[in-house]
Image (cartoon, rainbow, N blue to C red):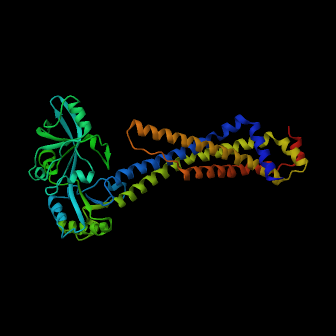
Amino acid sequence: MLIKYSVKTALTGLITNKSRSILTILGIVIAIAAIVLIVSIGQGAKDLILQQIQGLGSKTIVVIPGREPEGPSDFVNVFLDSLKEKDYKLLKNKNNVPGAEDIMPLVISSVKLSYFDETYQATILGGGDDEINNLMARIFDIFPDRGSFFTPQDVSSRASVIVIGDNVREELFGESINPLGEKIKINGRNFRVIGILPSKGQVSFFNFDDMVLAPYTTAQQYILGRKYFDRIIVVAKSEKVIARTVSDIEITLRSSHGITDPDKDDFFVETQADLVERVGFITNILTLFLVTIAAISLLVGGIGIMNIMLVSVTERTKEIGLRKAVGATNKDILRQFLLESVLLTAIGGIVGIALGVALSFVVSLILTYSLGLNWEFTFPLSAAALGLGVSAAVGLVFGIYPARQAAKKTPIDALRYE
């Protein structure tokens, strides 16, 4: 029997039982749609995170206190107070880290702000430099649209001045009050507003609309009451010297902390390339895990198809006998029922891909407009191809047994079947 005729016969068999065919492929459709949706969302999340990482620039190096986490159990870190003022001064010394162009310490915490009867929970970000004006503004590409940024003199004198984000301005002052020159109370101390940031949203990992920026010396002395840093940001002179700069940072800090064994470091250094690789690895693992769970429904759908095909073989026993009586071979019968199974799952795969893509697009729109995220819709071509191939393979694997059962029937027994 020609392949063309076998396909036509298989399609006729599926169309004859439309309702049953649709219900049979429902499991395949849901499984493939779930796989496409998960891969698309996973890729979108990965792209969004990478955009945030790249917001700091490719030459940025981050020094982080504590041991570098190597697994889930390592995220409860120790030595979180290991980066001190002396380390910052040593790193600023050009003899120690000649490849560094800019260096800035950061302190981060959550604080409660108050302005008369209005209160707001915000994030305090302390940074700046006592020698370079607007270093914090340049690194994060944030500049006030009203007022000014704090100066190197403000950093060195621990001035009680702050720059506020747009949400902070709106929540505390509304539209009727000009915040410039007004004083916000933090931990019982008044801080004068000298600048207001435009609505900026997310920059790297920080939402500057909900932040208060202050000289790091001020934040340490009057707000947080501590003498260590949460991060030290280093900007290399060029991408070519990043590896050497990382090495110089590690050598300098080990010498400062009296560490001779690198395995006992109480800090670690991350470049943007390291962070991109780490994020990519984590998101890929999570996506693979979720896809594996979704793929279990493919197995369930395959068993359902095998069951329905066995029922179909039983119902069409006389048809099988008649076709064998007029010359159809076992191979022809096997091919027909196998094609029916493969076509059934392939159609389910195509519908599932279309549904998955549509759902992915809707989810990306919801995340973009409702949460204000720059979420890009991604069509997962690899997932679509994988879904179509796997669905056809499922039809082939789970269709073999029913097809063999049909092919083994003898013409006389089949024609006698009631």
State the residue lying farthest toward the left: 157
Q: Residue 314's spot in the image, x, y percent? A: 79, 41
Give the vertical position of 22 relative to 220 (above or below). Answer: above
Q: Image quarter for residue 248? A: bottom left
Task: Pick the residue in front: 234 or 149.
Answer: 149
**Residue plotted at (60% across, 43% down):** 352
Identify the residue at horizontal 10%, vertical 49% (top origin): 158
Q: Quadrant of residue 133?
A: bottom left
Decide if residue 194 is on the left or right side of residue 333.
Answer: left
Considering depth in this image, is 131 or 212 the residue closer to the camera? Answer: 131
Foreground pick, 44 / 257 = 44
Q: Tell me the quadrant of the picture where the C terminus can be found.
A: top right
Residue 283 lies, in percent from the top left, at: 43, 52
Look at 84% across and 45% down and name the residue there: 320
User: Does residue 405 appear left or right of residue 156 in this picture?
Assistant: right
How many circles with numbers are drawn on the protein? 0
Report x, y in % for residue 415: 89, 42
Where residue 18 sits in the image (x, y, percent)?
72, 36
